């Protein structure tokens, strides 16, 4: 896809008054098509995975990361 086509989902999310926050806007057919809202699927173990990512990031960078 061209850079212009790649920017269309972000432009729609930012400018469409009907766009909802927290939504995923992407091409209808994965890599082409008009930008449409797709469902955001959450993993049942998402919080555990987030915690693991934070721990690995702190360990590998040597920087204590804080949220808040």
Image (cartoon, helix red, strand yellow):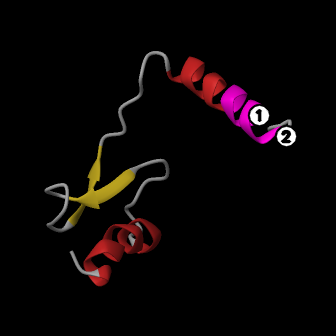
Q: Position of residue 49 (x, y in %)?
A: 55, 23
Q: Quadrant of the C terminus?
A: top right
In the picture shown, does residue 48 fall above or below 54? Answer: above
Tell me residue 39's x, y (percent): 30, 40
Quadrant of the image containing the N terminus: bottom left
Mark 1 and mark 2 residues within 8 Å of each other at the beta carbon: yes
5 lies left or right of 7: left
Calculate the distance from the C-alpha at mark 1 to the C-alpha at mark 2: 5 Å
Callout 1 secondary element: helix
Q: Nearer the viewer, residue 49 or 36?
A: 49
Q: Residue 32 at what x, y percent from top left?
A: 15, 66
Residue at point 36% right, 39% down? Answer: 40
Name the residue tied to disc 1.
58
The reply to whether the magenta stretch includes residue 10 is: no
**Is residue 57 inside the magenta stretch?**
yes
Q: Residue at x 29, y 53 (%)?
A: 37
Magenta stretch: dominant SS?
helix
Q: Which mark is residue 32?
A: none
Which residue does the numbered mark 2 point to in the structure image?
63
* Vertical arrangement, residue 47 with respect to residue 18, above or below: above
- Determine whether, in the image, residue 22 is placed left or right of residue 32: right
Secondary structure found at label 2: loop
Question: What residue do we see at 86% from left, 36% from top?
Answer: 64
For the record, the magenta segment spans 54-63
């Amino acid at each position: 896809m061209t850079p212009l086509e790649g920017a269309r989902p972000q432009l729609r999310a930012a400018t469409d008054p009907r766009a909802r926050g927290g939504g995923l806007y992407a091409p209808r057919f994965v890599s082409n098509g008009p930008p449409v809202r797709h469902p955001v699927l959450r993993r049942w173990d998402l919080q555990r995975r987030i915690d693991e990512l934070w721990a690995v990031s702190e360990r590998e960078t040597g920087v204590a990361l804080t949220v808040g």
